[in-house]
Image (cartoon, rainbow, N blue to C red):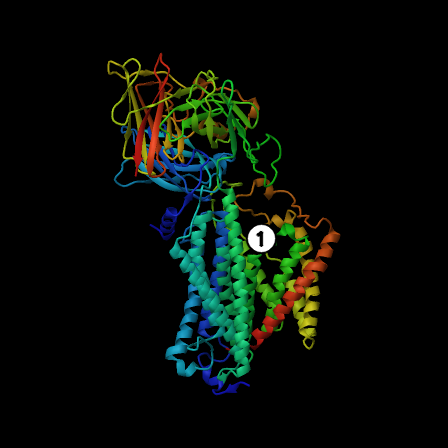
Amino acid sequence: MSFRNRIATLCAITCVWLTSSAHLGNTIVVQDGNAGPYGLRVLVRPPPVIPGLVDVVVRTTTASAMPTTVTLQPALWRYGTKGAPAPESAVAVPGEPGTFQTQVWIMSSGSYALHIAASGPAGSGTFIVPYTSAATATLGMPNWLGWVLAALGAFLVFGLASVAGAASRESTLPAGTVPDQPRFRRARLAAGFAALIACTLVFGGWNWWNAVEQDYRRSLDRPLDVKTTVTATGPRTLTLEVVDSVWRFTVPGAPQRRGRQTFTPLMPDHGKLMHMFLVQAGGRGAVAHLHPVRRNERTFTTGVPELPAGTYWLFADVVHESGATRTFVDTVAVGGGNSTPNSDGDDAWSLSPATVNTTPATLTDNARFAIAVEGTPVAGKDVVIHARITSADGNPAPLAPWLGMAGHAMLLRTDGAVFMHLHPMGTSSMAAQDRLARREKGDTVMHGDSQPAVMDMAAMPMHGGVATIAGQGDVRFPVAFPSAGTYRVLVQVRRVGHAIETAAIDVTVR
Amino acid sequence: MATSILSPTAARSEAPAGAIPLHLTAVIVGATSLLIGLIWDISWHRSIGRDTFWTPAHMMIYFGGTLAGLSCGWRVLANSIWERDQHRNDGVRIWKFFTGPIGGWICIWGAFAMLTSAPFDDWWHNAYGLDVEILSPPHVVLLAGLLGILIGAQVMAASAQNTEGYSAARATVVAFAGGVLLTLAMIAISQLTYNQRAHSAGFYTVTGGVIAVCLVAASRASKLRWPATVTALFYMAIMAAQVWILPLFPATPKLGPIGHPLTELVPLDFPLLLVAPAFMIDLVLRRMAKRSDWLTAIVLGLVVVTALAAAQWPFASLQATEIGRHPFFGAGYGDYQVPPEWLVGPREFSNEDGSVGATLRGMLTVAVPVTIITSRIGLWWGSWLREVKR
């Protein structure tokens, strides 16, 4: 491990994690895809600071076809691969056939397409992993380093004063001449003056450093400020308003104003502009997966289904046309008014999701719903959440497509500080993957309000070719837990001919 | 009143008359290595972007710092311990025990500052990301270290020049050390002195202020006939050489986004025409040798800014045309991030003053007073360099 990596590891211990834009509290991307004949699982571990090195692990999931070389090329959405450095070869991990690892530099915050290319005896192919980069943490300085730097700094100030004093005392005397008393006095003055100058410079440098730190903190990614209300009387309607002053959109074709941050317009993901999750505080009660409608640039509304009154954690995912993803976060009090029929046929909720830690849940017609974690849940490592739904006869139950997928999952740390919305192909947005692929082919159009409200999922090209529209009993969600702690994973599926059903397991991550 | 207890010749026996002492040679080589490494490193960041601890440019910087620091450290230890009797009273003494040449002490301080900047810079990159600017707090510590070594080299060269009879070689080494120092100073301010600013008062304030210290001091310190002119020529030769040499080496960007395709190392800018103000500085110092330093500084402030503007203003106009984009002048090179449209067509000057009249007013009311003050500092520094003997 290099000195730099050791410092990074040490500093990571003292990191204050703030937020990530892609998902709350978790910037790690896990994505499955097919690069030609090779099934690959890509694990992207971002650095806390930008520019920084992103750690990428590529694992082959097809035992029958193993690539011999894997390359990575990170391309910023605006530039594509034309503006990207040459692809980097990943190094085969010894003792793990089919696994490759490398680090690539990410220089800007924003939406990136990681172009993964694999080749080998079976042929070659590529696929895109969307990744939203953002500075997420501020780094504390380890005590020992602080003391070392302070000691070296003090030594430099003292040394400068000594050198100035000595120079003033005897540097202009011919060799062999002993300085007289006035020269000693002058030397003391010179040393004092040099020390004063040096201390002033150190003070100025300290202020400069503080200014850099403040600027950096301002640039850290954070959930935008939102105001959420639920009507207290009549049918309960939830309104989410983005009140943050930075919530401004790029106007297609208009010149960018220097220093003014704008976002590209939103686009639907799985056919919806926003996926909103309401989880009863603590994570063990009612849960709802809703799809609010946009009323104007800042406001989204949805009816509240028959959830019990109480305090709810709110997480709302949106995707920008750049491919960048964002989660709005809030806590909202839901009163005891009338429930409203869900505004959207794809809304789903559960008053008390069955916990299936040890035994499967029994569904309405004696079908079974089990969830297990494949692999040891360790922070930063990829595992698979495996949901298995069987009919009463024990055979895998046929699953109907819901929002274009065989299932959806939510990963929640029980303190509410981590939340992710998962799909069978991974943790990144399919809409982002699609848009980044289209931009690579030359599509630069930003649709904004002219985009369709609902996407035709069947017509949507699935890059990597793993988007299972429907399934047969088994649904797998690749994911990496960001940190140690207690998590709750909720899985939602729709059996053919049934309503959407939810089950959950508790996972302790080391 | 100082008292002589040893004859100077007894204490200065390590080099024959007129020759360059070995430790001065080592320090000058180290300083040159530092400067070349720094230029190469900046070019590397502009062209390739991604680097490691072990790039050749970094190696030259480490080598330069180590050579200068260790050779001076060795000199101090030798003078203080095993050659103590011989050198007891020919160096400057620090903390009562250690004695060595004053230039050596400044070099050692510079080497320590460079050493301090390493863990600081490493932490800085981990805390705030890979920096894309020349000026950051840890880089300023590094710059202070580089300045320490280069100033130490200049002082050591001046001391060697002053303790013997006139030697053209030793006087030229003083000018060369001054030229290396001037080059570092010009690189340090290069983010403020690029060609598109050369028709603004701010450009002449920063440039005039910095070159007055370096060139006025060089003019007074070296015993050459045209010391500031030779010093400026050293600067121009170094900077012009890098414009012509660096693009001979292939390079491709390893970081993105890449604005335009790049196939060779991108050099730093063509040197400013400092030979013009330098020549005028030499002339003024000759003509005003018997005048007070303050009066001389006032004249220098006016003359430096005028000569600099007379030379650089039209030259900047030339560089903004297609002629400037010729590889000889090197204005056609751009960092890998810049979009291709920046590399074609005429360039416009930043109109930060609003009008030519405002620029002239700015020069008179800001650039000239600043340059008067820095000229006075240069005179003080040069006088000391002319007197330093240890």
Q: How many marks?
A: 1
Instruction: Return the chain for callout 1.
Output: B
Q: Residue furthest right?
A: B357
Residue B200 location, x and y as percent? Answer: 68, 53
Residue B26 visible, this orientation: yes
Quarter of image, res A53: top left
Q: Nearer the viewer, residue A274 or B27?
A: A274
Q: Quadrant of residue A136?
A: top left
- Compared to residue B299, the image places residue A175 above or below, namely below
Is the residue marked by circle 1 packed among few (<14), some (14-19), or many (20+) residues within 10 Å? few
Residue B136 drawn at (x, y percent): 51, 53
Q: Position of residue A457 (x, y in %)?
A: 44, 19
Q: Quadrant of the C terminus of chain A?
A: top left
Percent of width and height locating residue A394? 24, 16
Looking at numbered disc 1 in the image, what kind of residue is underneath it? Answer: Gln
Q: Nearer the viewer, residue A400 or A213?
A: A213
**Tag 1 residue:** B191
Pick the front one: A125 or B143: B143
Label 1's element?
loop
Residue A371 falls left or right of residue B209: left
Residue at image point 46% right, 28% down = A333
